[in-house]
Image (tube, helix red, strand yellow):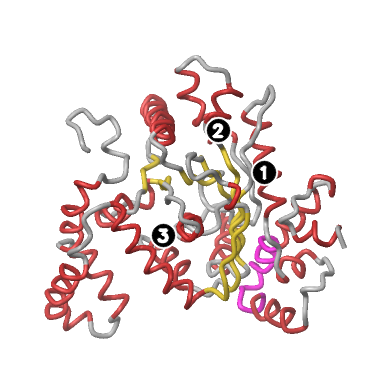
Amino acid sequence: MQTVNDPYQEIRPYHDDEVPSAIQRLIQDDEFINAILSYRYPHASGPLGWLLKPALKLYLTKKWSNIKTVQDVQLHVASYMRKMIKTTCDKVTVSGVEKLDPNKAYLFVSNHRDIAMDPALVNWCLHQQGLDTVRIAIGDNLLRKPCATELMKLNKSFIVKRSAKAPREMMKSLSQLSAYLRLSLDEGQSIWIAQREGRAKTGQDVTDPAILKMFFMEGRKRKQDFDSYMEALNVVPVAISYQNDPCDLDKATELDAVNRLGAYEKSEFEDIQTIVKGIVGDKRHVHVAFGEPVTLSQDTPESMAAKIDAQIHQLYRLYPANYIAAGVEHDSVTPAEQRLYEQKLAQAPEAARDYLREMYANPVLNQCATSSDNINQDSPLAAENNK
């Protein structure tokens, strides 16, 4: 329940008693209604918007009338996920989830390829196993519109204040975030957080030690040592692998622009467009691999980051495009897959093609760099080595 003195009210997800009013605010938000109309009825929303708006508001009021709690929201999202997976994925597979203890809360540190789909797919796989869904860390750079904040906080998301720039303000927000992470885990709520700020556009899945230093701020405040505090968080690496990244051409174009011009300026609604493209775009096979809790021995944030990376690289599911891009022969590379890869490459501006190759090749190179003795059995390379 919400209390008067709630130190996390600004950043935390909504509680059950806050859900109905948040839904009402969404339905009355013209920007939210306009966004739905422009997406569902792009040709009719302009001149006929004044007719469609009241009808859509009535429809949503009726459709969402039974949503009273956070769990109701999660079940509603699950029904959307089921339809989305059916239309945009050949299949979604999962490994390692059976090793998770349903009575424990975990801090899932994940590679990050897609803004919305990464945590959504982790939640889907947990939900399918009958496990509770996670609270999701999301940067405030994605919450420029009030309706976006409402949607995210309804869906168990909590806010990471990336916009804080002044040193004192930044330290305060990071300390609050660190304390909130620990509180969530103590409440039995698992967490999803990306291994670094922003998506790995180059396909280079590397954990930023700064994330781990933020985790430990609460531990330092409690005067605990790094190893024992971090192990108590139950940090589990997660590798999410998309056979086809719906946003890959956009990522390659952005990387090319940064290389040539020194910077890339996003348009006002680019983040929202990217989220939509990631949701509705063709993903082919998606695999979500849960690792094992990271064990520590006289570790530092840097050495712990390396342990997380090793698991993510080993767990990453490689597909034909990955092998083709890396120039590695593999049985999965058929003439049909070769054609698909070449068609994809041809769609990219010539200057951006090397970046497209790189983002698909890097997971192979990272996995090859891991010694065969340490390759996890979930890895396709392990299967190759065990033939």
Location of the N terminus by quadrant is top left
Residue 370 image offset from top left, x and y in percent: 79, 47
Residue at 23% in and 70% down: 34
Nearer the N terminus, badge 3 or badge 2? 2
| Magenta residue check for 38 | no
10 Å crowding of disc 2: few (<14), some (14-19), many (20+): many
From the viewer's perspective, is 1 left or right of 369? left
- Between circles 3 and 2, the one closer to the viewer is 2
From the viewer's perspective, is 308 left or right of 230? right
Nearer the N terminus, badge 1 or badge 2? 2
Residue stretch rendered in magenta on the structure: 345-360
- Residue flagged by tag 1: what amino acid is it? Asp
Give the residue number, with chain letter if any, for mark 3.
Answer: 271
| Magenta residue check for 350 | yes
Query: Relative to residue 1, is residue 156 depicted above or below?
Result: below
Q: Give the main secondary structure, helix, strand or loop, of the magenta stretch.
A: helix
CA distance for labels 3 and 1: 27 Å
Q: Nearer the viewer, residue 117 or 228?
A: 228
Nearer the N terminus, badge 3 or badge 1? 3
- Residue flagged by tag 3: what amino acid is it? Asp
CA distance for labels 1 and 2: 13 Å
Q: Quadrant of residue 158?
A: top left
Residue at 42% in and 67% down: 81
Disc ID at residue 212? 2
